[in-house]
Image: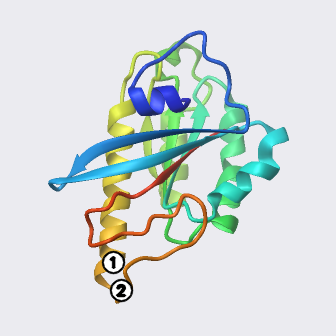
Amino acid sequence: MNTTTCSRNEFNLESKSTIGVEFATRSIQVEGKTVKAQIWDTAGQERYRAITSAYYRGAVGALLVYDIAKHVTYENVERWLKELRDHADQNIVIMLVGNKSDLRHLRAVPTDEAKIYAEKNQLSFIETSALDSTNVEAAFTNILTEIYKSVSNKHVGSDRQGYGGGSGTIIPTPPTEPPKKQCCNS
């Protein structure tokens, strides 16, 4: 999924792979509040790895996206998860996303295998198709709701007005300010 798919629920067969980092914003309603997310779509290619790790600091959520028809992209999830665990806040909300579910006839990653991996690593899990929009909206709604609840709970338990400091950081002012999210490709 790229930022166009992420932010506008549109797919373009002509779209190119992300180079470096792309940005988009997205708003949804959660518990009667507008949650606005800043989505940072980092390139999954090895050559951009050095610049993308800096974007993890301050992120409150991440989508680890792999292609269900290419097992190697699923194998890379382990490395991306380690990077997130090493560089992001320990309370980051992470969702494992198997993309291209429309290519079920080419499936290389069994759904059950990915579900077990997600459960083992305390990740939420969903399969999507950016091409036909299957579960794309659900993925964003689910992770943004989880982030909102996490940030709201943190805010309630804190005397401070906010937390964090890096790029992509949310600074809540009583839980009406939206969380920001990071979108990762593998």
Please state which of residues 141 and 164 is positioned toward the viewer in this rendering.
164
Vertical comparison of 181 with 74: above or below: below
Q: What residue type is labelled 2?
A: Ser
**Place of residue 154 in the rendered image (x, y in percent of width and height, measured from the top left):** 36, 77
Q: Which residue is drawn at 34% across and 89% down?
A: 159
**Which quadrant of the structure image shows residue 28?**
top left
Give the farthest residue toward the right. Answer: 47
- Crowd class of label 2 (few under 14; some 14 to 19; many from 20; radius 10 Å): few
Give the farthest residue toward the left. Answer: 32
**Place of residue 79 in the rendered image (x, y in percent of width and height, measured from the top left):** 73, 52
The coloring applied to the image is rainbow
**Place of residue 157 in the rendered image (x, y in percent of width and height, measured from the top left):** 32, 85
Vertical comparison of 68 with 142: above or below: above
Vertical comparison of 71 with 114: above or below: above
**Which quadrant of the structure image shows residue 33?**
bottom left
Q: Residue at x 41, y 49 (%)?
A: 37
**Place of residue 71 in the rendered image (x, y in percent of width and height, measured from the top left):** 68, 31
Please state which of residues 38 and 156 is positioned toward the viewer in this rendering.
38
Vertical comparison of 11 with 141: above or below: above
Spatial CA span between label 2 and label 1: 5 Å
- Quadrant location, the N terminus: top right
Q: Mark 1 points at which residue?
A: 155
Residues at discs 2 and 1 in contact (Cβ within 8 Å): yes
- Quadrant location, the C terminus: top right
Secondary element at image label 2? loop
Give the farthest residue toward the top. Answer: 14
Q: Residue at x 33, y 77 (%)?
A: 155
Q: Which amino acid does label 1 sit on?
A: His
- Crowd class of label 1 (few under 14; some 14 to 19; many from 20; radius 10 Å): some
Name the mark on residue 158.
Answer: 2
Secondary element at image label 1? helix
Left-right relation of 129 to 148: right
